[in-house]
Amino acid sequence: MQYFVVMIDYGRRGREAVVDPEITRREIISRIVSGEYRNVSFIHEIADISVEDVTEAILSEATLPQIPPEDIDLQACRLDHARDLRKHERT
């Protein structure tokens, strides 16, 4: 049997361990992305008799990639510039 334990820290209100054998890794990631799981202390993957700390791996999967503005659509910018140059040559 394999399942995950997600420990959520509520500060002064205490901690909550979410343990549900039916929650998958993908579901945990989607709950972190949606904001349902905030202030995660740790995530442990329990398989048979072994326990593995997968906090870093899951949190890194859940973060959105940071795309610098200059890398967003360089090809479209070049095509727009080329079109503008052609448009001005004709006049």
Image: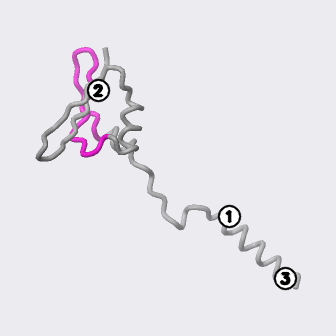
Tell me the SS state at disc 2.
Answer: strand
- Sequence-first disc among 2 and 3: 2
Furthest-front residue in this view: 13
- Sequence-first disc among 2 and 1: 2
Label 3 packing within 10 angstroms: few (<14), some (14-19), many (20+): few
Q: Residue beneath label 3, please?
A: 89
Q: Residue 76 carries which label?
A: 1
Label 1 packing within 10 angstroms: few (<14), some (14-19), many (20+): few
Colour basis? one colour
Q: Is residue 70 above or below residue 5?
A: below
Where residue 79 appears, as percent x and y from the top left, is 73, 67
- Give the magenta-colored segment's residue range: 37-56
Furthest-bottom residue in this view: 91
Q: Residue 6 carries which label?
A: none
- Of the pair 49 and 7, the residue shown nearer to us: 7
Where residue 81 appears, as percent x and y from the top left, is 71, 74
Where residue 14 appears, as percent x and y from the top left, is 13, 40
Q: Residue beneath label 2, please?
A: 4
Q: Identify which residue is drawn at 29% across, 34% down.
A: 54
Circles 2 and 1, Cβ within 8 Å, touching? The answer is: no
| Magenta segment includes 40 | yes
Where residue 3 appears, as percent x and y from the top left, is 30, 22
Q: Which quadrant is the N terminus positioned in?
A: top left
Query: Marks 2 and 3, how far apart in space?
Result: 63 Å
Q: Quadrant of residue 91?
A: bottom right
| Magenta segment includes 10 | no
